[in-house]
Amino acid sequence: MNHKAFEGSYQGEKAVWLQYGPYEAAVLPEIGGNLIAFRETENGYRFLREPAETEMDEFKSNPGVHGIPVLFPPNRYEDGKFPWNGQTYRFPVNEEATGNHLHGFLHTIPWTVEEFGTTPSESYVTVSVKIDKNHVVYAMLPHVFTFKLRYTLSDAGLSQHVFIRNEGDSAMPCLLAFHTALNAPFAEGSASENCKVKITVGERWALNDRMLPTGKYQTLTADEERLKSEGVSPYFAAMDNHYTAAPQNGRNRMELTDTKLGKTLVYDAGTSYKQWMIWNNGANGRFFCPEPQINLVNAPNMDLPADEIGLFGLAPGEIWEETSRFLSEIAAFRPSPFFGSSPWNVPVTKKKRREAFFSFA
């Protein structure tokens, strides 16, 4: 059996590779701990958007739109600042068009490889970043904390365990998202016209001309109604849209189906993610980003109930955990149990189902 964990390279960058059965994955510890590749090798499926060799310089200068970047704090903050416990935190304004700070800093800094190896049932790697008073991040986010990611590859697929612990002496904001970049289509020889997506979105937040929430909702279009029911093309319109999460049957998830192949990729994001961002780079027909997010964009600057917008902190010593997962399924067709009695059916194998788990915990 192909069952390995080893240090190697990815497009010339230091990587830890995991291999198990038909799956392989790669993590780039020195570029934000990014899970840059998750593949089903026997079918040639590449589920995550990966940079080509000629795109590596661009990727390193903007590592937020490939793989699964960690956004901490995520998305936009008005004028690059927000209040917290009587202080004002200030971040660089790195989106000139809006005058906002965008996407935090953990996806751009080096992480440390704590361990990697194999057991009889899995291949694994743990990467981490520790922010202390000497770290460059501390000047912007003055808290001591540790953030760990553990990736595990097995015959059940790929899992990710996320661990955040406040190791300082004051409460810290816990503002997090994943800028998950999915290929659509994910198989060579398929086309965007074969792709349908469903996501457990609820209301759509109205945004102002600086891409910040106004605090009000706007009416969903007919395609957005299909997005949360029978499914629609991920490129039905140019999207940089912000939605509440509305779990169905207890699950907060995305399903991407290639109707030509009869293959569905399920992203089960966990119900602690109260918001979704969906971005498709101008309906480009190649990739889109369903981004599970704890908090509303610009949440600390909003005058809305904290529980409603996912705004909370970690007390000294406190840990935040959540669980998400990916599942890949191969066809014979049946109605999806996760989106009610939808008339659109999703594929599921008659044979043993392959499941690729990400645990954001």
Image (cartoon, rainbow, N blue to C red):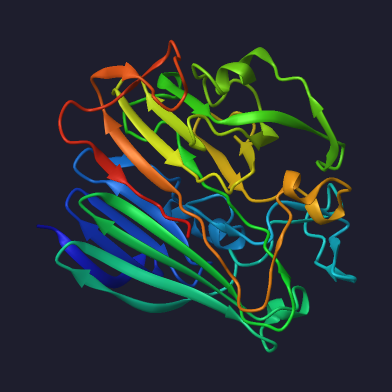
When the figure is inspected, residue 63 is found, relative to residue 193, above or below; the finding is below
The location of residue 266, given as percent across then percent down, is 40, 36
Rendered image quadrant of residue 82: bottom right
Residue pushed farthest bottom? 134
Say which residue appears at 41% left-offset and 77% top-offset. 113
Say which residue appears at 69% left-offset and 76% top-offset. 137
Say which residue appears at 83% left-offset and 47% top-offset. 97
Query: In terms of depth relative to the viewer, which is nearer, 161 or 21?
Result: 161
The location of residue 107, given as percent across then percent down, is 58, 63
Residue 11 is at least partly visible in this image: no
Q: How many marks?
A: 0
Residue 272 is at least partly visible in this image: yes
Query: In terms of depth relative to the viewer, which is nearer, 212 or 200?
Result: 200
When the figure is inspected, residue 318 is found, relative to residue 46, above or below; the finding is below
Residue pushed farthest top? 343
When the figure is inspected, residue 140 is found, relative to residue 335, above or below; the finding is below
Say which residue appears at 24% left-offset and 40% top-offset. 354
Rendered image quadrant of residue 349: top left
Left or right: residue 144 versus residue 185 is right
Location of the N terminus (image quadrant): bottom left
